[in-house]
Image (tube, rainbow, N blue to C red):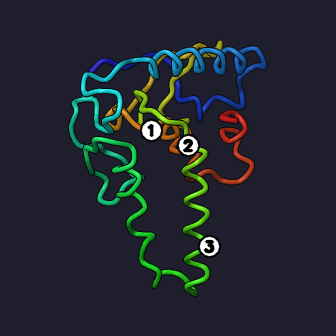
Amino acid sequence: MTRLPGKEIGQVYESLSVDAKATVLAELKTYLATIRQWKSPWGDARICSITGGLIRSIRVPNHIVGPYETSDEFRDYLLAPARNSSCFKSQEDFEESLQRARKLRTLERPGVKFTHGDLKHHNILVDEEGHVTGFLDWEAAGSYPEFWEYTTAMRYLREGFWWHGFLL
């Protein structure tokens, strides 16, 4: 296997100059906007891997699911465990949580976009000038709801970690 040049952004970000940090941000925006325009050969609505099949993600039960023909099918699968009201302190807590989840659906942008699937600071390589030299770990790549890339990148962050501010 060929090694890509650069280091994980998570290892070097805090030591980069202000200009290099600006370069990283600008290039990431360009690259992500570009890949999000790639069209899926399986249609505009199907949630699936890059090969059209199963989705691999730490965010889904059993880490492998799908594919799904619509975002609604996918969302229903993700929310299915929450339908068990016995997991809540009271029926009232359950109903409140259910209402919040329904409100979130109204904020969701329609559409499916090509997504890296695991965009985290340890999967982006940069050089000392802040130029992006590569993306690692494409096994979760595929067509996902528009929000997927951002919410995946935000998972498991400790409070105050620079990556949080970088993403916002």
- Tell me how far mark 1 sits from mark 3, CA to CA: 25 Å
Q: Residue furthest right?
A: 18
42 left or right, relative to 31: left
Please state which of the two labelled residues, at mark 1 or mark 2, is closer to the viewer.
2
Q: Earlier in the sequence, mark 1 or mark 3?
A: 3
Q: Earlier in the sequence, mark 3 or mark 2?
A: 3
Residue with the mark numbered 1 = 145
SS category of the residue bearing label 2: loop
Q: Earlier in the sequence, mark 1 or mark 2?
A: 2
Give neighbour class at mark 3: few <14, some 14-19, many 20+ (Cα, 10 Å).
few
Residue at figure coordinates x 30%, y 36% from the top left: 46
SS category of the residue bearing label 3: helix
User: Is 74 placed above or below 116 here?
Assistant: below
Name the foreground residue: 67 vs 58. Answer: 67
Name the foreground residue: 16 vs 145. Answer: 145
Residue with the mark numbered 2 = 108
User: Is 5 placed above or below 97 here?
Assistant: above
| Tag 3 and tag 2, C-beta contact below 8 Å | no
User: Is 142 placed above or below 89 here?
Assistant: above
Name the quadrant of the N terminus. Answer: top left
SS category of the residue bearing label 1: strand
| Tag 1 and tag 2, C-beta contact below 8 Å | yes
**Displayed quadrant of residue 97:** bottom right
- Tell me how far mark 1 sits from mark 2, CA to CA: 9 Å
164 left or right, relative to 55: right
| Tag 1 and tag 3, C-beta contact below 8 Å | no
Please state which of the two labelled residues, at mark 1 or mark 3, is closer to the viewer.
3
Residue with the mark numbered 3 = 96
Q: Amino acid at mark 3?
A: Glu
Residue at figure coordinates x 48%, y 15% from the top left: 34
User: Is 99 placed above or below 38 here?
Assistant: below
